[in-house]
Image: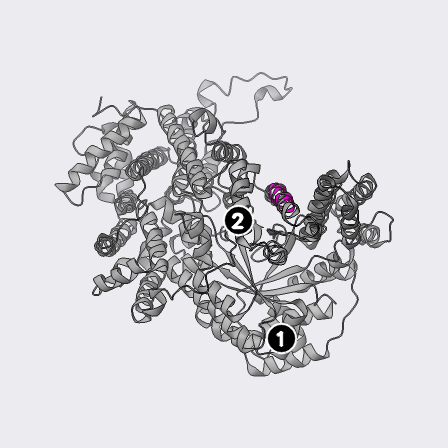
Amino acid sequence: MTGQALSTVADLEIRLQELHKLTAQTPLYNPVFQLGLELSRKLENGEMSLDHIEALVAEMECEGLRARAARLGRMIETVLPAENDARLDAAAGPEADADDFTAFAVRWQRPAAHVVFTAHPTFLLTSAQSEAVTQAASSGDLSETTVCAASHRRDAITLDYEHEKAMAAIARGHKARDRICARLFDIAAARWPKRWKSLHPMPVRFATWVGYDMDGRTDIGWSTSIRYRLLEKARRLAGYAESLEDIEPEIAARLERAAAHTSDMAARFGEDLSAPEALSAAANALTADHPDKLVSLSGVIAELEEEARHGGQDVARRLLVTAAAMRADGLGMGWIHFRVNSSQLQNAIRRRIDPEGKLSLASQAALVRMRELLAEVKPLRSNFAALAIENSTAVRQFLAMAQILGHVDADAPIRMLIAECEEPTTMLAALYFARMFGIEDKVDVSPLFETESALEHGGRFLDAVLSEPAYRDYAHKRGRVSIQTGFSDAGRFVGQIPAALAIERLQGRLAETMAANGLVDVAALIFNTGGESMGRGCHPSSIDDRFDWQLSPWTRRRFLRAGIRLEPEVSFQGGDGYLWFGSDELALATLTRMAEKPLWGADTKAPTDIFYRRTDLSLDFYRAIRRIQHAHLESATYSRAITAFGLGLLNDTGSRKSRRQSDLAADRTMSLRQIRAIPHNAILQQLGYPVNVIAGVGTASDGNREEIADMLRASARGGQLIRLVRAANALASIKTVAAYGELFNSAYWASRPYRGDEQHISEACLKLAEYLTKDDRAGVFRRLASRLRVDAMKLHKLLDLLPDETPLADREHTRRSLGVLHSLRIALFKHMFLRTVMVPPFSRANDISRDDVVEMVFTLRVDEGLAQLRRAFPVHFPSIGDFSVAEPSDYPDSRATGYAQIHKDYIDPIARSHALGLRITTALANEFGAHG
């Protein structure tokens, strides 16, 4: 037996603690790597098997799920429906509105927020695991029997899968909102018995872009969006009918017939429509007049409210709750957001503004020509045939919106989100197409600010757009100015803290620009998009911090003081975000937190936070952090380290690809700009250090530490910033980053069997050592760890000057758990690497050599490497018994049959080790509270 028994997680945690003590003697000693080595030795000499490792992984996987459920419960504060009812009662109590019905109605007819469910690829947990986490968070029962029985077998994640998950989350949101509305009606009835039926409550509004987001995707056709919109309509109509069937059976029957008709239309648009005849039949069925076709609920709402006027309180309440839902959602599960890239719009308008391609769309000449086009354009009729033959992605979106507004839901507006929109011409182009297809009065065009350039020049962009007379006329027609801010990509480009502060300034600039351009009489809709992780805009400390981080009280006060109505919108992204609506209890708690503290609310009389007064300090602090974050992003060292394993550290978590396919040479020179924000952030978690949250804060305070600490201590915004940094730092380990780099250290592999204790793997170690002599990754990781360490030491000095407001009791246990998980994965990686070079030589095929397979495994393109090994060493052949040949044969004999032993000794262990490594990926992400 080699060393201590490491048969349980408790054994591993104790051993890791012992190894940590040795760092006092040898500062460069790495406990995580050493524990991984000890596990590797036991695995290679047979003391442990992959069965033993799997049992340890399963236990840690369970702990991660329990940590995830506990975090969700802590963030949501209280889950019990009765307690949330009581908190809503307190928020809507007499002291809130001085017993003034008008004030009460104004307060509760204004959504606390718009909630948008997106299809971001964060479906990390399996359906079973998601259900286990949400049920545990809902019940407060975090026991292993509740959480840990869930299967780890991954779901096949398709767009249909994502859409159904989004619809299920929204449906639970509907149920929670109905409960809140019913309670508001009861409160109003008790206080204003003669007026309560005129209340139109709308505590929250729902929306989704799942199935409508075309940015970076080619797999969503226009018919997919139409089909989803029809499915959503049918589902919502069925829900309305069910809520009315016992109190208004005639209206319910009408809605049921409309639901059936819509379901039939959805089925038609789910067929193959490539043939003109098939498309024509589906289009004609949808556009034809039909007694069961319903494209507006205004008449139904009026009927329900009239019936309520004459009904008793119980019946009237139910009728009015359904009417309130109809008013909020229309003929769908919620509003919908289409999304395109600015380049798609520019390509579409270029054909009209500059057919010869000689004009820069950023030029003043292009802007002048765009104004002329916009003034000249007249609405054109369109149909599904025009949609089918259109080859411009952007124009197809406008055509699809026109068909939806004409034949699916004439009332609910549609958002058009434009990614990377940095030129006023692009905004005017969107207005041009909206006007061309006669939907300008129903489409909210919204630029997205998330890139470095957009954040830097966004203020000037807003000045330019809002000064355009055509845009101002459009904003008055729509009643709002809409923008979107992206914390995810912004956090990747400039770091999460600089991103949040830059977005905050941009939001404040919008208030100024609207006031300067006479737009105080329209609303400002700000859609803040971010994920559930610290690196993508979700503050982990509390639900108040979560919402205030993306739309700060300082920003809200700017709009309130200008007299501009603020319409805040917040995203719940993919599988991670849907957990907040994973049960009826969680959905009710989430919406109650919003109702208690609307995201547009702020104290206009509050004194100015010192963070905004001492701009001589805070602005320099911001710029220094941003400079360091930018240096990392542009650094070849950082890029090479973060991409050292490619994207192979991560599970597939969505139907959208994380980046384009590439060859092995491209992997070696992969740029961080090739990787989307979610996988970039996820890799940082998996390597053990959230660089995009922590890096730069320590260095930015260097030289002025005490004064900056005084400012942060006295500032609410500064305190929030430090809570985010502390939360990230509590999970961060530079030793872990360094440990992964040592996997590429040729000297380690050459020295490992040097003393003769592991002669059975000495040849494999020598092959690895020789292969890695020219590899740069070990040095890259060491340089990165050194840079992070210098910055971290300065951060610790700053944190020592600031009190920890909310210390986590289980912080050290969590850090040990993370260390154990990383050590287990390092042992598995070593097992994969050793088994790969032990595979017997095989002939080159399809231009793939043995060294290529080794590199595939090093970059964790393991499935591709295994496919090559299985090709080289097949186990399934045509059998001689398959043939009816009269002549006998003694060949093949027993020595000529297949490569089953190679599979057993090498290929199968590589595959199993990789699968276990990906389960560790999930466990690590759960400790961080999110994927990416």
Relative to the observer, which residue lies in front, 777 or 217? 217
The relative height of residue 235 versus residue 61 in the rendered view (above or below) is below
Q: Which mark is residue 571?
A: none
- Image coordinates for residue 900, horizontal then vertical, percent: 45, 24
Residue 887 point in image, percent of width and height: 61, 17
Q: Position of residue 797 (x, y in %)?
A: 21, 55
Left or right of 500 on screen, residue 696: left
Q: Which mark is residue 472?
A: 1
> At x 30% / y 65%, what residue is drawn?
621
The residue segment tinted magenta is 172-186
| Amino acid type at image mark 1 | Arg
Label disc, if present, on residue 91 of the rendered structure: 2
Quarter of the image where one finds residue 817: top left
Please name the amino acid that badge 2 sits on: Ala
Q: Residue at x 25, y 55 (%)?
A: 795
Residue 176 is covered by the magenta coloring = yes
Q: Position of residue 192 (x, y in %)?
A: 66, 50
Badge 1 element: helix
Residue drawn where x is 73% and y is 76% of the image: 377
Q: Is residue 914 rendered to the left or right of residue 311?
A: left
Label 2 CA crowd tier, 10 Å (few <14, some 14–19, many 20+):
some
Asked whether residue 361 appears in the rendered view, the answer is no
Q: Name the main secondary structure of what is drawn in magenta.
A: helix
Decide which of 307, 650 is in the foreground and name it: 307
Closer to the observer: label 2 or label 1?
2
Is residue 594 in view?
yes
Front residue (pair 232, 50): 232
Looking at marks 2 and 1 on the same chain, the residue that comes earlier in the sequence is marked by 2
